[in-house]
Image (cartoon, rainbow, N blue to C red):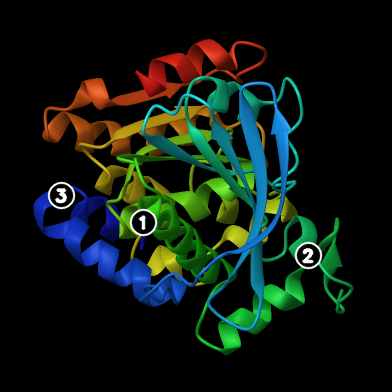
Amino acid sequence: LETRMNASRKNPGGYLPKLLQAAKKLSGYEQPVKAGSPVFAGRFQKEGYAIEKYFVKGEGNYIIPYLLMKPERPNHKALIYLHPSGKSAEAGPGGEMEWFVKKGFTVLAPDMLGVGEMGPGVFHGDSYIKGVSYNIWFLSMLIGRSILGIQAGDVVRLTQLLQKIKGIDDVYGLAKKEMSPILLHAAAFDPAIAHVALVEPYSSYRSIVSNRFYSPAFVHSAVPGALTAYDLPDLAASLAPRKLMMVGVTDGAGKQSDMKSIEEDMSVIKAAYQNCKCDNQLNIVTEKPGDNLESIYNSWIK
């Protein structure tokens, strides 16, 4: 499969359009037809911005709770912020979301299915490893969907909501760790997400499969059968010429032990951006971000 995929990658013009169709089918992604009307649930005034609480109906019989941080001096740009610990993880004073809102961004941070207020729930099943229920992932296969496919649809749904806000001209997306594949699929399927930043994402599904001690935290963001047709670097490649930043990329174990494998995955993305002569739109920072994330974010939002 890997040999076949590498051969296909040599013809990006013919490969990438087919890849997106395959990714939609394998992930069980369903394009949101219409975003519902959000329900207002409260408001807090802060210095220079306000935090509003909402929830909106998801694809199925569940809600997506989210925070909307609105600056007093908006810059006409919005940011969807996906964090593995949910919407409140960086919402406090001095948090990353506050940093963006003080730059003029309207910031939307949701609790996706299985995260924050929306999970992970009480069901464990007989395959429960390091806080992750594999049975839920197995169940998604039985219905021809994936957890990620449903979540990616909800990210697109939230993007549609942001586009309805008066004065928003541009939508950015930022995701951390295991939330990165969700944003990557959503952005590949919806060009409205024009700028993408992935912080400490794992490099590929291939890296999970080939790593004996992969991180169980990554399982729910994996698409069953994906490697028969595509991998995460291919989705990232499909974003060219949109602006893409990747910081502190890890292997399937959530570490940087297998740098050779990570570099191979990154080379697929670099080749695509070189092919469209838009290298300046791609920024891959190998090192773990540490405390210098703000300077890295500054270069991304320019």
Query: Where residue 259 sits: x, y (%)?
Result: 53, 28
Q: Residues within 10 Å of mark 1 (few under 14, many from 20)?
A: few
Q: Looking at the image, which is closer to me, 150 or 246?
A: 150
Q: What kind of residue is marked 2?
A: Gly
List the residue tagged with mark 3. 12
* Residue visible at 29% across and 57% down in the picture: 5
List the residue tagged with mark 1. 2
Q: Is residue 200 left or right of residue 226?
A: right
Q: Is residue 190 left or right of residue 60?
A: left
Q: Looking at the image, which is closer to me, 14 or 153?
A: 153
The part of the image, by quadrant, that contains residue 194 is: top left
The C terminus - image quarter = top left
Of the residues under marks 1 and 3, which one precedes in the sequence?
1
Residue 11 seen in this snapshot: no
Query: Where residue 294 sits: x, y (%)?
Result: 56, 15
Residue 134 seen in this snapshot: yes
* Residue visible at 72% across and 76% down in the picture: 136
CB of mark 1 within 8 Å of CB of mark 3?
A: no
Q: What kind of residue is marked 1?
A: Glu
Q: CA distance from mark 1 to mark 3?
A: 16 Å
Q: Residues within 10 Å of mark 3 (few under 14, many from 20)?
A: some
The part of the image, by quadrant, that contains residue 43 is: top right
Of the residues under marks 2 and 1, which one precedes in the sequence?
1
Q: Secondary structure at mark 3?
A: helix
List the residue tagged with mark 2. 119
Q: CA distance from mark 2 to mark 3?
A: 38 Å
Of the residues under marks 2 and 3, which one precedes in the sequence?
3
